[in-house]
Image (cartoon, rainbow, N blue to C red):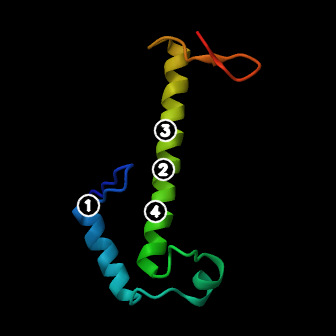
Amino acid sequence: MLLYFETYGGWSEPVMRLFRRMQDKVRNKLTQRQYENEVSWSTSTWLALQAQRLSVAVHIASTWESGRSRQRCSSLGCGGEAPSSNEEGAATT
């Protein structure tokens, strides 16, 4: 089964089905530990908490892969030099 995630928050239908099944299994309720240690004002349900956690994981993985790709490209000399900055932090060419 292919689980597809977009970096801007989109989930494929198989992901939605999986999350609905899990949500039903836990009755969309947080455990006491989750409620005490992980809940913020925006995550009052199990589904909201898991969606937030998944979003963070996808963004971290995407950023890591982007940085890794850029590093590979820099070492191969493709696409030109990345802009550098002077001591004050202003971009230089």
Question: Circle 2 — which element?
Answer: helix
Tell me what residue is drawn at x 46 percent, y 71 percent: 50
How many marks are shown on the rendered structure? Answer: 4
Residue ID for mark 2: 59
* Sequence order check, earlier mark of 2 and 4: 4
* Sequence order check, earlier mark of 4 and 3: 4
Label for residue 65? 3
Tell me the CA gap for discs 3 and 2: 10 Å
Q: In which quadrant of the rendered view does residue 21 lie?
A: bottom left
Label 1 crowd bin: few (<14), some (14–19), many (20+), radius 10 Å: few
Where does the N terminus fall, quadrant-wise? bottom left
**Residue 74 located left or right of residue 78:** right
Label for residue 54? 4
What is the x, y in percent for residue 29?
46, 88
Tell me the CA gap for discs 3 and 1: 23 Å
Q: In which quadrant of the rendered view does residue 41 lie?
A: bottom right
* Sequence order check, earlier mark of 2 and 1: 1
Viewer-nearest of discs 2 and 1? 2
Residue ID for mark 1: 1
Mark 1 residue type = Met
